Image: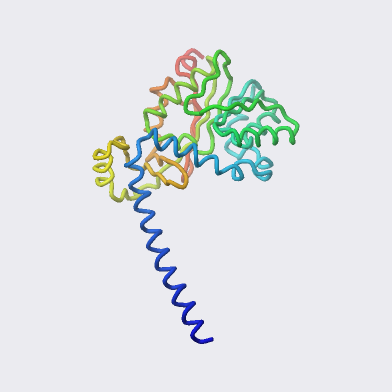
Amino acid sequence: MRIVSHITFSISRAMYFISERLYRLTAVFDALNVAVFTPEEMAGIGRKAYNNLVESFSSEESIMTGLVDWEKETVERFAARKGSFLVLGAGGGREAIALAKMGFRVVGIDSSPVMLEVGRQNAERWKVAVDFREGDFLSSDTGDEKFDYCLLSCVMYSSVPSSEMRVKMLRHIRNNLSDKGILIIHFLLRPKNAPDKGKNIKLMVARLVRGNTGYRTGDSFSTALHFMRYFPDDGEVISEVSQAGFRVLDKEAYPESEYMVLSPADSHEAQ
């Protein structure tokens, strides 16, 4: 019995040693992946990973939660006049179903057929009308149909892998909005004074392999999940929304994230 205990203890110690080293090695490769992959490649990997998160975005508990506090307060302030709402990355329908309950006509767009089917089932279960459509939130196109409001929540703005892609996405959204439309976006903020370990190495690797040559401090990527940008402050976001033709109407920062309420610049000036 004594021999067995020594053997099992030795094996467990060896496994712990191996797993600890593998974890560190994984962290190194994850840190380099943000430089190795191009923004387009990271976006593609993110779409595939998203399909594995059905339970996280479609559980009954999630649907019952509805809009979180900041979403609800912002909608009540800036969308008091009921109308049409475009929800990008609608998932299992948490936001879309909550908005439909509030009296909005809601269209939810998602890239995952599995998510869309779950969203339709959830809407039917809660007895609300939501028009779920398949599409990519990076290049949403609703044709001649214009919306009064659009929501891009759950820090989805931070999941877009480059400034160029974010500006292009915003321009697509602007085309989907009415002249006096409102867009609500949510993104992550980087902790102040957080170190950027290996920045120069990442930039060198990006140039060598022609990967993410636009790498900036705050870019991160996990092959198990997706790209995520932690903005140093909201200045970069304000610049991007301005390039896309939006004006900031309101914003609120929290320790780790911020939301902005936007409107097409020309329509805002005319009001």
Classify residue 75 as left or right of residue 127.
Answer: left
In which quarter of the view is residue 238 placed?
top left
Outermost residue on the bottom side: it is: 2
269, above or below 109, in the image: above
In which quarter of the view is residue 142 placed?
top right
Please name the residue shown 67% across and 45% down the image: 61
- Look at the image and tell me in which quarter the N terminus lies: bottom right
Q: Nearer the viewer, residue 75 or 64?
A: 64
Task: Check the image and tell me how it is coloured.
Answer: rainbow
Please name the residue shown 46% across and 39% down the image: 46
Q: Nearer the viewer, residue 85 or 53?
A: 53
Classify residue 220 as left or right of residue 76.
Answer: left
Q: Report how many numbered discs are placed on residues in the image.
A: 0
Classify residue 220 as left or right of residue 64.
Answer: left
Please name the residue shown 54% across and 27% down the image: 135
Residue 101: image location, x then y, percent: 71, 31
Please name the residue shown 37% across and 34% down the image: 39
Residue 265: image location, x then y, percent: 45, 18
Residue 114: image location, x then y, percent: 61, 36
Residue 63: image location, x then y, percent: 67, 40
Q: Nearer the viewer, residue 152 or 36?
A: 36
187, above or below 246, in the image: below
